[in-house]
Image: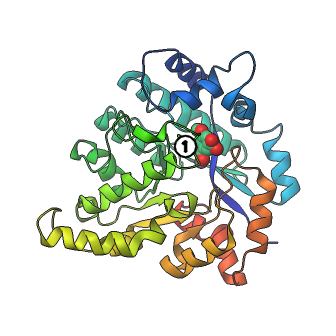
Amino acid sequence: KMRKIATEEAWTIPEVAAALRDVSRGPSQSLDKLLVGGIYDPPADASGYSAMNFLDGLLDIEEKRLPEMDALGVDMHLLSLTAPGVQMFDADTATDLAALANDRLAEVCRKRPDRFSGLASFAPQSPKRAAKEMERAINELKLNGFILNSHTHGEYLDDPKYWPCLEAAEALDACIYIHPRAASDTLKGPLQDYGMDSAMWGYGVEVGTHVVRMMAGGVFDAFPKLKICIGHMGEAIPFWIWRINFMNSRAQKIGRAPKTKLSIAEYFQQNFVVTTSGVEDPLALRYTIDKIGIDNVLWSIDYPYQPQKPAVDFMDAAPVTEAERHALYHGNAERIFHIA
Ligand SMILES: COc1cc(C(=O)O)cc(C(=O)O)c1
Ligand SMILES: [Mn+2]
């Protein structure tokens, strides 16, 4: 039986759910409020996002998640605090809730180390305290990497003020999974209608923008060993990488982009891995493996936002060799996230 490790599996704790409910009732203009309000402060008529009832799935480990994993032969969920994590809160609240969530996550992993591993949260709102929490999460809590839900109050990791977090991740040899949230206030413009705010379109635009900024901004010259993971088959970047690379090298020549030691295509190849979350498309998978190499593609379900069984059926039937299937299902996750 082939070991199956799913790598973008969401959960939450009651304290974070309550804090998000409070934010959704507050003055924030964040586009995340559509979703956060729907999940954590559902309207009486259960319309909108609340109709999906994601909250039960997020809070649950033993009731439904684990029995479903057993039934489907899913050995492990690599858990992460669901988007937008602690990133909508003020610095102190975010720092405290990140530490609490990490403690709870470590507890879940300690209780069933063969079934759960975890990505630690951190609060970029306070970068130096975040770096300390990142060290604690890996060295003391023995967690497996980090989760960040893209922008924090509209700012991105190419901004040097967040580089203490990148320095910590690189030094700890711990991968940062950059997960979506709704587009930042400066990016959200036309993304606010037709359900485009979340997984259909805006999420990909938000994360894609984030990682292109990092590569074009020289982050991987400053941190050459830093490893970043992005979901959703690489947020369309593997498809666009030829064009992004071509146009960035031109921008560097005409002085519109900083000179970098390597090309964007090389950074994407060396510093990134992608997962299959929420893109159960065999042709997109085959292309992505052929484009960026089998070592850089990992399986994920995206529970509870995606049901487990279709994600297993998709990977079981995927047009890949058995060696590739091993890499996708568990080999790459074991290497990138240090899973025994
Ligand atoms: C935090 O809320 C989320 C909503 C959805 C969605 O399908 O609308 C997907 C994800 C996700 O991909 O993790 C997260
Ligand atoms: Mn997800």
- Determine which quarter of the picture holds residue 82: top right
- Determine which quarter of the picture holds residue 63: top right
Residue 222, image x, y percentages: 23, 60
- At mark 1, the secondary structure is loop
Residue 181 makes an appearance in the image: yes
Q: Residue at x 59, y 49 (%)?
A: 200
Q: How is the image coloured?
A: rainbow
Residue most toward the left? 255
Residue 183 makes an appearance in the image: no
Q: Is residue 154 toward the left or the right of residue 6 in the image?
A: left
331 to 302, vertically: above or below: below
Q: Is residue 105 toward the left or the right of residue 44 in the image?
A: left
Residue 217, image x, y percentages: 24, 58
Q: Residue at x 67, y 21 (%)?
A: 42
131 to 311, vertically: above or below: above
Q: Residues within 10 Å of mark 1 (few under 14, many from 20)?
A: some
- Determine which quarter of the picture holds residue 326: bottom right
Q: Residue at x 41, y 60 (%)?
A: 173
Q: Residue at x 31, y 56 (%)?
A: 214
Look at the image and tell me in which quarter the C terminus lies. Answer: bottom right
User: Which residue carries the number 1 mark?
Assistant: 196
Look at the image and tell me in which quarter the N terminus lies. Answer: bottom right
Residue 6, image x, y percentages: 67, 57
From the viewer's side, name the closer residue of 30 and 146.
30
Residue type at mark 1 is Met
Judge: label 1 CB < 8 Å from ligand 1. Answer: no
